[in-house]
Amino acid sequence: MPLPPDHARPLLVDALRRAGAALVETTPAPAPSGPGGASPLQGQAESPTLSAWFPAGAASTHQQARRVEGLFRASVPGARGPFRCTLRSRADWEDRWNLGVERIQVAPGLEIRPPGTPTMAATSLELVAGPGFGTASHPTTRGCLQVLAELAAAADGDPGSSGAGGEDTSSPGPAPTSGAFRILDVGSGSGILSVAAALLLGRPVPSRPVSILGLETDEGAVEQARRLAERNGVTDVVRFRRLHVTPRVLDARVENADLVVCNLEGPLLLPLVPALRRRVRPGGLLVLSGIPDELAATIRDQAGADPFLEMSARPSSGWWTVVASRGSSTVSLGTGADTG
């Protein structure tokens, strides 16, 4: 499909991934070959295109195209353009997915690495191929990973020490099943944030074990996230659940947590913010990402409204990651500047 304007391209890539694309590639425009360097097509230069690879057995090309178009237009009002999807075999797109993933040093001592490559950092997360969003190539994922790394450094191996005490006055929700330090990852995608949290914060603490739950709508992404947890040896700490998340569902079916993370596109994130705030225990943290420049002020105002305090708001390439605490917190976060 033709590429949209620069400001809308990340939203189209996100729409493709959320529609189930296992791989999204940019294909450069062919070199001019007409007279004087002009394109042979009516003398106009051709544009680069995006190619999206879907696993075998996915919905029909027509259904995929309609879903992508709907997601994209919801993010970019007035967007137009032909949407053509071609289904490929799993072996084909998985090989190409692996070739497109790079080793990324996200924070000191934390790396995200391609499948089958050696460890080169103290904390190393090995990716697995799949349709879920999140390989650390996008600034929103990196922003969340950097926050998790900072929390791990501040906690010094005991995440329970970072929160303030006090009575839990958040909205009722189901009662917690244990005294664990609970982490909730809403819209978990590939599972990268949940698994990274398990690697960074999941060290055994006798007085308070760690429990991580990732919630995701897409069945393929949930399966990928479970494989990611198994690949990185954290299935005893993290679990994933397929759930269509709405404010009502969050209030009725999801337990409160000490750390709530949500990395979703701004238009999807915005209506969830009040319910996400209600899921945070006193002294706990709310981490929001996927926020474009145009929604940053609105979401920052919502996230940091009383009784929350904004701790950090960090921009990166047109996207924001916002951290707020419910009441006082002993955690100190850096600016997390990321210009990549």
Image (cartoon, helix red, strand yellow):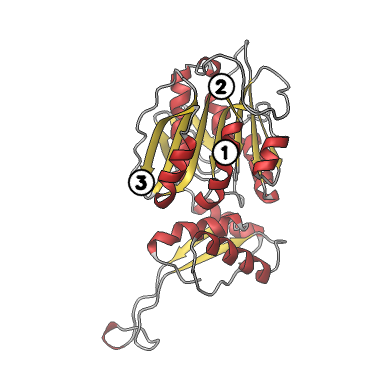
179 displayed left or right of 15 = right
Residue located at (67% from left, 48% from top)? 217
The disc label shown at residue 340, or none = 3
The amino acid beneath tag 1 is Pro
Which element carries disc 1, helix, strand or loop?
A: helix
Asked where in the image residue 231 lies, by quadrant, the reply is top right
**Mark 1, residue position:** 274
- Give the Cα separation between the discs numbered 1 and 2: 15 Å
Residue 96 visible in this rendered orientation of the protein: no
Q: Nearer the viewer, mark 1 or mark 3?
A: 1
Residue 16, position as x, y percentages in the image: 56, 60
Outermost residue toward the left in this view: 36
For badge 2, the amino acid type reads: Pro
Residue 282 got which mark? 2
**Element at badge 3?**
loop
User: Where 158 sits versus 76, above or below?
Assistant: above
127 sits to left or right of 26: right
Three-letter code, disc 3: Gly
| CA distance separating discs 3 and 2 | 34 Å
Q: Earlier in the sequence, mark 1 or mark 3?
A: 1
Whichever of callouts 3 and 2 sits on the residue coming sooner in the sequence is 2
Q: Quadrant of residue 226?
A: top right
Residues under numbered marks 1 and 2 in contact, where contact means CB atoms less than 8 Å apart: no
Residue at (37, 45) in percent of width and height:
316
